[in-house]
Image (cartoon, rainbow, N blue to C red):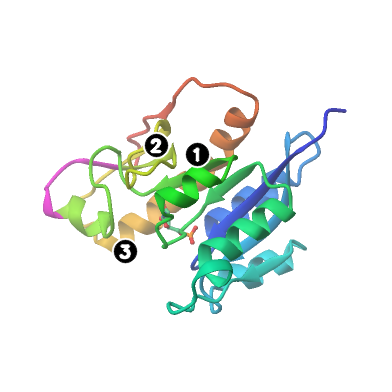
Amino acid sequence: MPEKIKIAILISGLGSNMEALIKDIKKQDHPGEIAIVISDNTDALGLKRAEKLGVPAISLVQDPTAFGKNSFENQLFELLTSNNIQIVCLAGFMKILSSKFLKKFSGEILNIHPSILPSLKGLNTHRRILEKNLDVHGATVHKVSKDLDGGMILSQTTIAILEKDTPESLSQRLKPKEHQLYVQTLRHFLSGNSNIIQKLDLGH
Ligand code: GRF
C-alpha cells in the first residue's frame, strides 16, 4: 500500500465542508490521511465537530502584536511542517495567507469559494450574486495562490437562482453541493488528475 498523503484542514467557523472532507478521507480507499484541523478562531464550531470525528483540532490564537516565531503564520507553518502536511484544505478559513507564507510552504493549498470564479472573488458572494439579477450561482475549488481567489480552478458546481432566493437560502442550497464538489475534487487532485470537474446541474 502506498503511503497516504498527510492532509490538514483550516477552518474559521461551522466546518461543514471540513466534516464532509474528513468523513471521506477516513474511508480506506482514500489516498489521503487527515492529520489535523486548525482554526484561527477559538470559538469555531468546526473544532468540536473535528474532535467528535476523532481528529486532533487546534486553535491558533491570533495576537496581532505577536511577531517573529510567535506570529500566526509562523505557528501555522510550524504545525504543518511538524505534522508532515503535504496538502492543506481551506474550508471556510477567513484569514488571508501572505505570499511570504505561500512561498515558504512547500505543499499544495486548496480552497473552496462560494461563486463561479473568476466571477465574485471576495466576501458576501450570495448577496452580491442576487444584486446582479443572474440565473446561476455556484462554487469553485481552486488552488491557493498569492492572488485572492485567483489560483488555478480545479472544479466548479452550479445551482439555479430562484426568484424567492435570499443570501441565506442560496447558502443553504449550495452547501451540500460544495461538500460533494470538495470531496470529489480532493480525491481527483490527490490521484494526480488535473482535468477540471464541472458539475453543471441546474435542477432546483
Ligand atoms: C463555504 O460557503 C465555503 O465556500 C466558504 O466558506 C463557507 C464555509 O462553510 N469558503 P462551512 O464552514 O464549511 O460550513
Q: Mark 3 or mark 2: which comes first in sequence?
A: 2
Position of 182 compared to 157: left or right?
right
Q: Residues within 10 Å of mark 1 (few under 14, many from 20)?
A: many
Depth check: give the residue in front, 187 or 152: 152
The Cα–Cα distance between marks 3 and 2, rounded to whole angstroms, is: 18 Å
Question: Which label sits in the foreground, 3 or 1?
Answer: 1
| Magenta part of the chain | 131-137
Q: Helix, strand or loop at disc 2?
A: strand
Residue position marked by numbered label 2 in the rendering = 157
Q: Helix, strand or loop at disc 1?
A: helix
Residue position marked by numbered label 3 in the rendering = 168
Task: Give above or below for 57 relative to 91.
Answer: below
Residue position marked by numbered label 1 in the rendering = 181
Asked if the residue under mark 2 is in contact with the one under mark 1, i.e. CB atoms within 8 Å, the reply is: yes
Residue 47 is one of the magenta-drawn residues: no
Depth check: give the residue in front, 147 or 37: 147
The Cα–Cα distance between marks 3 and 1, rounded to whole angstroms, is: 20 Å
The Cα–Cα distance between marks 1 and 2, rounded to whole angstroms, is: 7 Å
Q: Amino acid at mark 1?
A: Leu
Is residue 44 visible from the viewing direction of this image?
Answer: yes
Q: Amino acid at mark 2?
A: Thr
Which quadrant of the frame does ligand 1 lie within?
Answer: bottom left
